[in-house]
Image (cartoon, grey):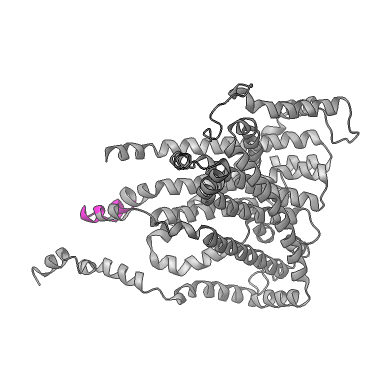
């Protein structure tokens, strides 16, 4: 809203401003630890977090935990997305299906995601099966909803055109419905990726068994290892960021054809 | 019948009769009795009942529907359900309230002042990359597992989408609105209250609703993980004692309350944004 402040007379250059607060906080932390402002063991020095990070990377602990988490994440994500796509397409294409299953689906969707974990843990045990089932569920709902929305909002003009061109069933689905609904479908898949990562952490906290980055943090908390917990927070943030970035790039790439076709009109 | 169908297809008054599929589709569109939704859940209920009746699976793993209903009535009659519900609602309202106030302040400040935005936005962005669950172990170490932990996590969950939507909403107010206000010689105060906030209200309200969804999710997680009362605790408690009827009754209440509160926000939206429709 530069129109409220037309003249930018601030002394600090624009690119540096974002760094001021994080560096100040870091400096404050360093000072607090260096001069022992608090005797609490929770006030770990900055360099100790760094040492822990190096140690975790070098010993391979980080990689094995990350690998376990990400593998689970991606398997659950893949199952949830496939199921969600199939369900969402059936939902979008068949009004009868929507009328019959829709209300039940929307009712189940209301149940807060994490409330499923205790039930799933009874049905699938505490191991990877329950975690993957939960992750699939987390990815399933947004994909169904967005696929359905996308198919239902295919412009009627396009449907008219397809009717005029006498598309057969296959062409109808692959040349009209799915391409026209692709932005919404991809948005759903993107959302599913974010939810699945959140659910990965939740599953590791609530079904404590096996390895994973969430387990690393839980262990750190139980042993009062603040350095390990802080390191975990940073890794979790970074993985979330990387997944998000990857999804956004892929989305742009897969939808690149649309820009061209709009320009042609 | 030779030429008839062609004539029908060209006639705009009867397009639906052109093909059997279209007829069926049109019929289905108009024919939508509510009971069409009933057979599927009834079938599931019957399957559940039969499975429990003949003990295809152990009752600890799948209690019968009547047992769940009885437990539910029991929990309501004894007041246990309401006590826990009250605690959960209080937590979510306080946390959500703090999140709304903080999110609005932060979002408005970032939206109105580019200098403030330059300083704070990168840190805010980095902070919001870590999901609520990522902060949980850290906060447990810092503030323990008392009420403070729950309020902080719930308000963080609500704050991020509200601040982000408020900021983007204000930033995306069309420049021509502001030009009109300038031509009309609006004071700065008028510009804010008569132009910028009304124009940014739809995205801001969207943020508030997202914020509530996230807050409710955060409440359930934090009660599942670290609580000795509340709806989430009922779920964990039932799970530990292998009383799945308690778990299911609590899960239903969590879903129903979340739904009702979301409907309340949707009603408020109609009131808040109703004026917009009159313009078109």
For this orientation, the residue located farthest to the right is A39
The secondary structure that dominates the magenta segment is helix
Q: Residue at x 91, y 33 (%)?
A: A39
B72 with respect to A102 (left or right): right
Is A83 displayed left or right of B23 in the figure? right
Count every numbered label the image shows and give the total: 0
Q: Is residue A197 left or right of residue B29?
A: right
Vertical relation: B10 (above or below) B36: above
In front of the other: B60 or B189: B189
Whether A57 is drawn above or below B149: the answer is above
Read off the magenta span. A161-173
Of residues B136 and A28, the one nearer the viewer is: A28
Residue A153 percent across, percent down from the top left: 38, 55
Q: Position of residue A3 (x, y in %)?
A: 51, 34
Residue at 61% across / 44% down in the picture? Answer: B163
Rendered residue at 73%/30% (across/down): A56
Please say whether residue A162 is one of the residues in the magenta stretch: yes
Q: Is residue A33 left or right of residue B89?
A: right
């Amino acid at each position: 809203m530069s129109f409220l402040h037309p003249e930018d007379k601030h002394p600090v250059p624009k690119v540096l401003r974002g760094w001021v607060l994080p560096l100040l906080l870091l400096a404050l932390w360093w000072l607090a630890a260096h001069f022992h402002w608090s005797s609490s063991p929770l006030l770990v020095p900055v360099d100790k977090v760094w040492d822990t990070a190096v140690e975790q990377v070098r010993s391979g602990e980080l990689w094995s935990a990350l690998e376990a988490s990400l593998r689970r994440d991606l398997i659950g994500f893949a199952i949830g997305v496939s199921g969600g796509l199939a369900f969402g397409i059936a939902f979008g294409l068949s009004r009868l299906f929507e009328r019959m299953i829709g209300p039940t689906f929307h009712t189940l969707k209301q149940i807060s995601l994490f409330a499923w974990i205790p039930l799933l843990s009874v049905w699938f045990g505490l191991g990877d099966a329950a975690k993957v089932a939960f992750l699939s569920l987390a990815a399933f709902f947004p994909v169904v909803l967005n696929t359905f929305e996308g198919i239902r909002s295919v412009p009627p003009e396009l449907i008219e055109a397809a009717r005029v061109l006498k598309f057969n069933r296959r062409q109808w689905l692959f040349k009209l419905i799915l391409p026209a609904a692709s932005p919404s479908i991809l948005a759903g898949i993107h959302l599913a990726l974010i939810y699945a990562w959140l659910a990965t952490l939740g599953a590791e906290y609530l079904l404590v068994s096996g390895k994973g980055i969430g387990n690393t943090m839980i262990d750190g908390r139980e042993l009062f290892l603040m350095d390990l917990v802080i390191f975990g927070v940073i890794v979790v943030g970074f993985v979330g960021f990387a997944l998000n970035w990857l999804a956004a790039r892929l989305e742009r790439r897969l939808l690149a054809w649309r820009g061209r076709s709009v320009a042609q009109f | 019948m030779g030429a008839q169908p062609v004539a029908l297809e060209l006639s705009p008054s009867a397009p639906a009769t052109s093909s059997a599929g279209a007829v069926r589709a049109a019929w289905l569109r108009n024919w939508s009795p509510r009971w069409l939704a009933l057979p599927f859940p009834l079938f599931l209920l019957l399957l559940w009942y039969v499975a429990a009746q003949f003990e295809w699976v152990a009752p600890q793993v799948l209690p019968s529907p009547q047992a769940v209903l009885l437990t539910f009535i029991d929990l309501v009659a004894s007041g246990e359900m309401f006590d826990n519900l009250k605690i959960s609602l209080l937590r979510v309202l306080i946390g959500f309230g703090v999140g709304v106030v903080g999110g609005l302040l932060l979002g408005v400040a970032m939206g109105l002042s580019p200098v403030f935005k330059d300083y704070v936005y990168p840190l805010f962005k980095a902070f919001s990359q870590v999901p609520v669950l990522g902060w949980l172990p850290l906060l447990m170490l810092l503030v323990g597992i008392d009420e403070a932990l729950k309020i902080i996590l719930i308000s963080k969950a609500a704050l991020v989408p509200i601040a982000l939507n408020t900021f983007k909403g204000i930033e995306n107010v069309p420049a021509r609105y502001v030009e009109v206000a300038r031509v009309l010689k609006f004071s700065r105060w008028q510009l804010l209250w008569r132009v910028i906030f009304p124009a940014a209200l739809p995205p801001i309200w969207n943020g508030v609703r997202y914020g509530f969804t996230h807050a409710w999710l955060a409440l359930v997680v934090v009660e599942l993980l670290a609580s000795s009362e509340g709806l989430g605790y009922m779920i964990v408690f039932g799970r530990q004692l292998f009383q799945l009827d308690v778990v299911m009754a609590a899960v239903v209440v969590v879903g129903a309350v979340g739904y009702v509160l979301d409907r309340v926000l949707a009603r408020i939206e109609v009131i808040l944004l109703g004026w917009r429709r009159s313009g078109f």
